[in-house]
Amino acid sequence: MSEQNQLTVAPQVVREEENFVVIQNAEGKFSRKAKYHDYSSITAQSREEKIWLMNLMEGDEETGNGLKEQVGKHIVVENIITRKYDKINEETGQLEYGVLTYLITPEKQVFVTSSKNVYMSIIRIMDLFGKPTDSEWENITVKVMKEKAQNGDMIKIKLVG
């Protein structure tokens, strides 16, 4: 076989837990990959609410704002939605997984990011403070921050209130 037609060996799942999987690649190296979960604190009741939610999930530009454009700002969060997704890496043919996190203000302003760091922070916040659907939930305030990373800037949040 020519170099162009070589088969690649798919990574093998060695262990699977609720929030991560351990994978061994073709060279024998191990890595841990996060598993993402769908969550929504919003239950659309009326037709109008369902249309708004559908447009939000479909990426309607009038419904959501990129979180990366909010660096340095404080956002009051009333509701949270996380949606996992997958895509094919066009170079390797491997399936890659990601997550979209939607932070929704009391005024229904929506901030969206695919930052895994933000997702993990939101999960830790909900583990500690409860979820927006819990009776003891109080809106949280997060500060949007940016940090240099290997592949450019990394968006993250800090709980400030």
Image (spheres, rainbow, N blue to C red):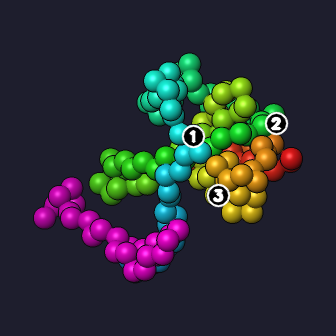
Cα–Cα gap, marks 1 and 3: 16 Å
Cα–Cα gap, marks 2 and 1: 22 Å
33 to 155, vertically: above or below: below
Q: As drawn, which residue projects farthest toward the right?
A: 161
Looking at the rendered structure, the kind of residue marked 3 is Ile
**Residue 129 visible to an observer of this rendering:** yes
Dot label at residue 74: 2
Looking at the rendered structure, the kind of residue marked 1 is Ile
Q: As drawn, which residue projects farthest toward the left?
A: 1
> Percent x, y for residue 87?
37, 48
Secondary structure beneath label 1? loop
> What span is in magenta?
1-26
Given this view, does label 2 or label 1 mark the residue nearer the observer?
A: 1
Q: Are the residues flagged by discs 1 and 3 in contact, CB closer than 8 Å?
A: no
**Figure quadrant of the N terminus:** bottom left
Q: Are the residues flagged by discs 2 and 1 in contact, CB closer than 8 Å?
A: no
> Percent x, y for residue 150?
63, 53
According to the picture, the residue beneath numbered tag 3 turns out to be 123
According to the picture, the residue beneath numbered tag 1 turns out to be 42
Looking at the rendered structure, the kind of residue marked 2 is His
Secondary structure beneath label 3? helix
Given this view, does label 1 or label 3 mark the residue nearer the observer?
A: 1
**Residue 55 visible to an observer of this rendering:** no
Secondary structure beneath label 2? strand
Q: Residue at x 65, y 41 (%)?
A: 79
